[in-house]
Amino acid sequence: MSPHLSSNTWNPLLASNNYFIDAPHINIIEHPYFSESLGVPFVAAQPTPHLNRAFHHSKHIAVKAVSYGTLFHPFPSMIKIALTGGIACGKSLVGEMMQASGIPVCEADEIAHRVLEQDESVKAALIKEFGSEIVGTEGHIDRAKLGQQVFADPDKRIKLNNATHPVILRQLDEWVAKQGATSDRAIAIIPLLYEIDAAKAWDVVICVGAPAGEQLRRLTERGLSPEDAKARIEAQMSQAEKMERADYVIYNCGSKSLLEKQVNQVLRGIRGE
């Protein structure tokens, strides 16, 4: 079906159990599937095992729609949820919103920081591979200096991922196992989930996207030059591919309240509501 929605209201389309958000104040969505400048973001807010995805396009709305067959309900006692997406798309903010709903959340980046500071075997492997110049004044790995090397060289990024991600993923698994004592769901924010081929270990994958212009703006506000910001965006898998692979998509290009609506819809979808 090709939905036709008003261009000035937020309208849940109940048919086919797909929900669409309309935000006319957004001027452009930069996404390769969008054939023209559009006025709204989109969200797919239903569980998607056995799904067929289709993109609907019109002058006023773009929607990632899903249809699904037999769902795997109930989920296992612990639902392992991976939250991924492009750099500077708002993954941490979405994670905070989900944590506020009562779901425990862990960031892989926080584990990575600890690994670089505390794991001597990882530190030694990185120094051997990238040189002593990546060591800061206090003896820890200087992430900025390391980043200068790996974001400019795809082969070095692979070597960095091979040295660090097995340790990070093992610690994430340990964290998820501990959450099972008090919660039936746990969320891990893993920016490079697809790049390191780790998606199969998770029951549900949520992808957070944002317009490329917003990514660049946020990265430059963090102190990166436009050139460095662009290089970091291009170093990752495209948002389009991540969105297509994910079970749920949240598009962060509007207000915080709009983002919260999408987050709540996704959480209801995961609960099977």
Image (tube, grey):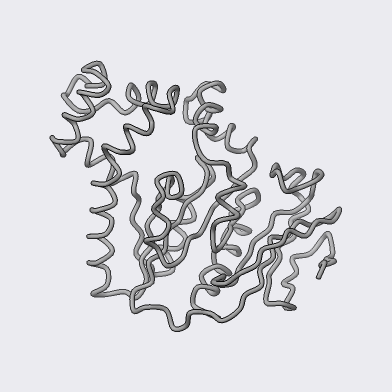
Left/right placement of residue 232 relative to residue 36 reads: left
Residue drawn at x 33%, y 25% as measured from the top left? 146
Q: Nearer the viewer, residue 108 or 32?
A: 32
Total labels drawn: 0
Left/right placement of residue 239 relative to residue 160 reads: right
Residue 125, given in percent of the width and then of the height, sits at 19, 30
- Give residue 9's quadrant in the image: bottom right
Quarter of the picture holding the C terminus: bottom right
Residue 54, given in percent of the width and then of the height, sits at 71, 62
Q: Is residue 161 above or below residue 96?
A: above
Left/right placement of residue 146 relative to residue 231 reads: left
Residue 266, given in percent of the width and then of the height, sits at 55, 67
Q: Is residue 128 above or below residue 84?
A: above
Name, please, the residue furthest toward the top: 133
Q: Nearer the viewer, residue 239 or 22?
A: 239
Residue drawn at x 43%, y 56% as measured from the top left? 199
Residue 186, given in percent of the width and then of the height, sits at 36, 66
Quarter of the picture holding the N terminus: bottom right
- Give residue 247's quadrant in the image: bottom right
